[in-house]
């Protein structure tokens, strides 16, 4: 348990806290959307979060033990470098005291210690306060397929008619241009640390100026045009054509640009497994784009490279 400067207690939740939290939700949300809203909020907080995700969740209590806030989060089992903040609430009587920001900071610090490099969360369209809060903490609104109040929204994100605003906060510390990467091949391969990014990515070519609103993860200017690698949903929203749909894998090791043999080892292992690989070098990391349907095979292959003998 920790204690804030104004006497509030922050601790991990326990199963008996489940009913205590459910009991305050309608009051905290001012009965929003009536019985349907009450049912939806309870549905989002089943007991399992208070039994199996307690090491990444927090409960705030006042001096008299009343519940004043909570954060339910977890580290993604499918994407080990990703942390997800699922549900956060603060009592109206305790707002504007920095409780929510403090909970986010605790979760972020814990996630970073566990190797997380990216945080994600969502909110409902039209929730301007939530958008302002998250962007103020360094989250970015992800691209969407429509705008609501000038904010990108992903339609049907949680099912038909259930749109959401999604946020991403990248936690990787920026490197100085003088930062030195690893050059020893044995060390590089042992430390490969492949990271599979969520989503599908596509290659497209544009001529002339880059379309407004596009945010490529790779950009290459060639005589034939401007090659962009962008999230597929972004290409679809902008009407960009493509044929190749890829998964994006980042090699977590910081490899020096002058390092010899990493690209050959990675592409060779993938080729032996029958997986095409498009490798791009960034300043800190190498990035591999593989056919989306072979992503799991590629991750297994790269993990085997890291675990195997290095020559």
Image (cartoon, rainbow, N blue to C red):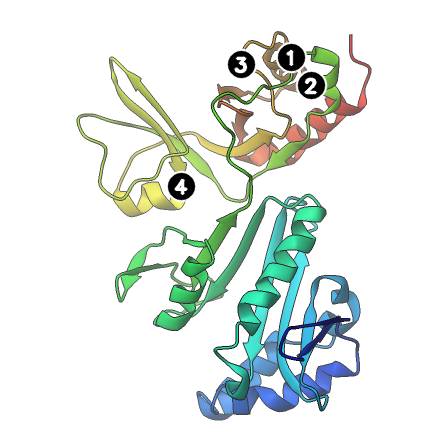
Residue 183, relative to residue 12: is it above or below?
above
In the picture, the disc for residue 265 is none
Locate the C terminus and report the quarter of the image it occupies.
top right
Q: Nearer the viewer, mark 2 or mark 4?
A: 2
**Residue displayed at 48% across by 78% down:** 96
Residue identifier under label 3: 257
Q: Residues within 10 Å of mark 3 (few under 14, many from 20)?
A: some
Which numbered disc, 3 or 1, marks the residue that appears first in the sequence?
Answer: 1
**199 left or right of 78 in image:** left
- Going from N to C along the chain, the mark reached first, 3 or 2, is 2
Q: In 3D space, how far apart are the residues under numbered discs 3 and 2 (Cα atoms)? A: 12 Å
Measured Cα–Cα span from mark 2 to mark 4: 31 Å
Asked where in the image residue 222 lies, by quadrant, the reply is top left
Query: First in sequence: mark 3 or mark 4?
Result: 4
Residue 135 lies, in percent from the top left, at 41, 58
Distance Cα–Cα, label 1 vs label 2: 7 Å
Q: Nearer the viewer, mark 1 or mark 4?
A: 1
| Quadrant hosting residue 229 | top left
Examine the image and state in which quarter residue 16 appears: bottom right
Of labels 1 and 2, earlier in sequence is: 1
C-alpha span from label 1 to label 4? 34 Å
CB contact under 8 Å: marks 1 and 2: yes
* Mark drawn on residue 183: 1
The residue positioned 24% from the left and 12% from the top of the image is: 223
> Which residue in the protein does label 2 denote?
188
The numbered mark at residue 232 is: 4
Q: Position of residue 196 (x, y in %)?
A: 60, 37
Is disc 2 placed on a helix, strand or loop?
helix
Graded by Cα atoms within 10 Å as few (under 14), some (14 to 19) or many (20 or more), the crowding at tag 2 reads many
């Amino acid at each position: 348990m920790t204690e804030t400067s104004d006497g509030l207690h922050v601790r991990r939740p326990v199963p008996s806290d489940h009913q205590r939290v459910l009991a305050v939700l309608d009051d905290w949300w001012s009965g929003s959307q009536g019985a349907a809203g009450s049912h939806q909020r309870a549905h989002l907080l089943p007991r399992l979060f208070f039994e199996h995700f307690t090491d990444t969740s927090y409960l705030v209590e006042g001096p008299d033990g009343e519940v004043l806030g909570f954060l339910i989060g977890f580290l993604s089992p499918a994407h080990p470098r990703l942390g997800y903040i699922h549900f956060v609430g603060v009592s109206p009587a305790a707002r504007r005291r920095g409780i929510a920001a403090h909970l986010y900071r605790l979760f972020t610090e814990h996630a970073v210690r566990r190797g997380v490099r990216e945080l994600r969360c969502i909110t409902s369209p039209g929730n301007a306060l939530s958008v302002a809060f998250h962007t103020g903490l360094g989250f970015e609104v992800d691209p969407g397929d429509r705008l609501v109040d000038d904010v990108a929204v992903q339609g049907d994100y949680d099912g038909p008619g259930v749109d959401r605003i999604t946020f991403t906060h990248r936690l990787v510390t920026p490197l100085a241009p003088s930062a030195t990467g690893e050059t020893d091949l044995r060390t590089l391969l042992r430390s490969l640390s492949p990271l599979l990014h969520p989503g599908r990515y596509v290659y497209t070519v544009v001529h002339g100026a880059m379309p407004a609103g596009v945010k490529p993860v790779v950009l290459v200017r060639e005589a034939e045009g401007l090659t962009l690698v962008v999230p597929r949903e972004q290409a679809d929203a902008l009407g960009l054509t493509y044929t190749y749909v890829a998964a994006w894998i980042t090699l977590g090791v910081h490899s020096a640009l002058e390092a010899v043999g990493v690209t050959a080892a990675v592409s060779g292992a993938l080729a032996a497994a029958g997986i095409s690989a498009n490798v791009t070098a960034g300043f800190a990391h190498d990035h591999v784009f593989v056919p989306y349907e072979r992503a799991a095979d590629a991750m297994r292959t790269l993990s085997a490279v890291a675990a195997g003998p290095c020559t």
